[in-house]
Image (cartoon, rainbow, N blue to C red):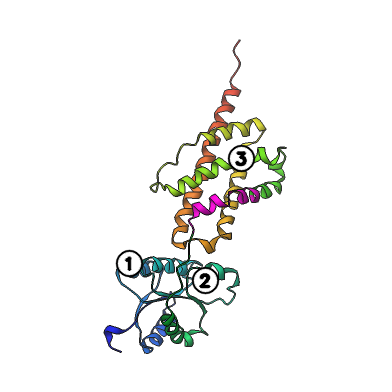
Amino acid sequence: MTEKTKTRLLLVDDDPTLRQTISLILEHGGFEVRCAENVNEAIKLIGSETFDVLVSDLHMPNNGDGLTVVSAMRHANPKAVTIIFSAHPEMKAAAAAILAQTDDVLVKPAAVGNLVALIRDKLKTGPALARILTSIATILEEETQATIEDWLARVKADRIVLSIDLNKAKRAAHLPQLFADLVFRLRNPLPLGSRAHISPAAAEHGLLRREQGYTAAMMVEESRMLQVSIFQTLENNLHRVNFSLVLKAVMAIADEVDSQLAQAMTAYVAESKIDAEPVLA
């Protein structure tokens, strides 16, 4: 095998000793190896060079780092074989999400000895067919009602918020429009630092919550629980999303929900001030 025909492989691992060991094994197996010690280095190499294989650690130091690298490789080199290494054998909980985006998952260091044979086998069969990944906006659109039900369950467990006696329909009346605004925001992203869109529905919600007897603290707590429910929905659907887009989406979600809370609170406080003014004869 000449230098020109060697299979090009990108190895990503933040452990220098293991990275050197695996690199030597792979080079001895006939691969041309390029190394990166973190996600940023890996993405730079993926953007500037072409690779046939990716072998990446899963945790560097964050749990999803390896999947971010896999997503970048899938986008830049869709024909590349991608293999994830993990130091943790308890992979069952994350297996669906991981296998949705990579060709195989190995537990290190025990599997290192089989790595060369595995790569050769994967190269013969080719990478797994590209999975159909769903946008986070679509997931939230499809799971709106389920997320609202999750939120209602959290509210039901909060005795302070529950002290305001409302049926489910009235308590969650603002949420369909909020989710519609959120989906629109995700599909029409704003530049970082931009003000969120004005939502008349958010102001109306603030006025309604005041009429219903909510305190400002109750409104803040409901908003906090809503974010938890939204992120729970995303966690339940990790196997359907592109990991490289998750961080931006989470930032947009948090900003939109907080913005709508701020608009609701502004209307709430303004109405309170009007009511507090003395009545002139």
Foreground tag (3 vs 1): 1
Q: Are marks 3 and 2 in contact (CB under 8 Å)?
A: no
| Residue at which label 3 appears | 219
Residue 214 on the magenta segment: no
Above or below, comparing residue 217 to residue 121 in the picture: above
What distance separates the C-alpha of mark 3 from that of mark 2? 40 Å
Category of crowding for the residue at label 2, using alpha-carbon neighbours closer than 10 angstroms: few (below 14), some (14–19), many (at least 20): some
Q: Is residue 12 left or right of residue 49?
A: right
Task: Classify residue 35 by image quadrant.
Answer: bottom left
Above or below, comparing residue 141 to residue 8 in the picture: above
- 161, 237: nearer the viewer: 237
Amino acid type at image mark 2: Leu
| Residue at which label 1 appears | 47
* Residue 54 place in picture, x, y as percent: 40, 75
Q: Are marks 2 and 1 in contact (CB under 8 Å)?
A: no
Count up the numbered dots: 3
Report the magenta residues as a range.
134-150
